[in-house]
Image (cartoon, rainbow, N blue to C red):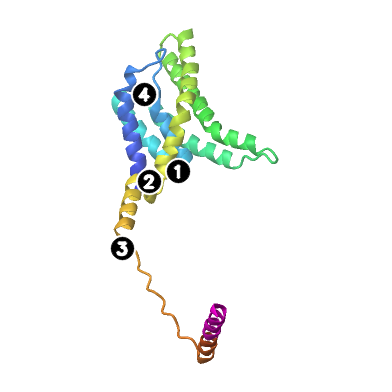
Amino acid sequence: MRRAFRVTFLVISAFLLQTTALSYFKMSGVMLDLLAILVCAAGYACGMYVGMASGLLAALLMEVMAGDLHGLMMVTYVGAGAYGAWVAGRLSEFTRVGNRMQERLVKRFAPMLAIGLFIIAKETIYVMYFYLSGVDITFMHIFRVAFAGLETVVFSLPLLPLTYWFLLRKPEDTILAKWFTKRKREEQPRPVIPAMPIPPLPDKERAADSESVFAKEGQTFDDQE
């Protein structure tokens, strides 16, 4: 349940950010598809069902704002969640025996490249849809498709790790939980260790100690004489 709230909060926040602030920060006429990145990340981190559910929510929100494109957004965003889970499954099986460095690099940066390829495929489908709708396609449209993929790869480098951390962190790892744990430890009284009683010496050891004391005193007396 906690993870479902996190995914819902993430999708709604990305939708609000994409429809308000990001529309003013277009690069070469291309706006970053933040929702697609986060839906792919949700599928990659939490599995296919969570990814497809987050894609369904994102598609419903976007179709309310942009209108119905004959279910095209539904297909692309739900597919983004399933695609993220598929990439996670493929990378979990990827191994390089004897070359662990290459294996770590591939598992670290392959998700970003995979999302960039997905955005290129999504934008290509949109261009074909508009072409079939009677819109003239120019070289600028092709350039924007490639630029959208490159832009997605660059912004995915910091966004994907942050998304994984937000979705997969444990309750005790939050800053508020750590603060409460620290305060609770400070408020707890420190245990007082009672002093251990010294056991009495047996009679034989007590007699031996007294004889050694008398011997030392007789020696010091002889030295003084």
Mark 3–mark 2 distance (CA, rounded to whole Å): 36 Å
Q: Which is more foreground, mark 4 or mark 1?
A: 1
Quarter of the image holding residue 103? top right
Q: Earlier in the sequence, mark 1 or mark 2?
A: 2
Q: Nearer the viewer, residue 157 or 184?
A: 184
Residue 220 percent across, percent down from the top left: 54, 79
Q: Secondary structure at mark 2?
A: helix
**Label 1: which residue?**
46
Mark 4–mark 3 distance (CA, rounded to whole Å): 65 Å
Residue 176 sits above or below residue 78 on the image? below
Most frequent secondary structure within the magenta stretch: helix
Magenta stretch bounds: 212-225
**Label 3: which residue?**
189
Q: Is residue 102 visible?
A: yes
Residue 27 percent across, percent down from the top left: 40, 15
Do the numbered discs 3 and 2 sit on residues whose CB atoms are within 8 Å?
A: no
Q: Earlier in the sequence, mark 2 or mark 4?
A: 2
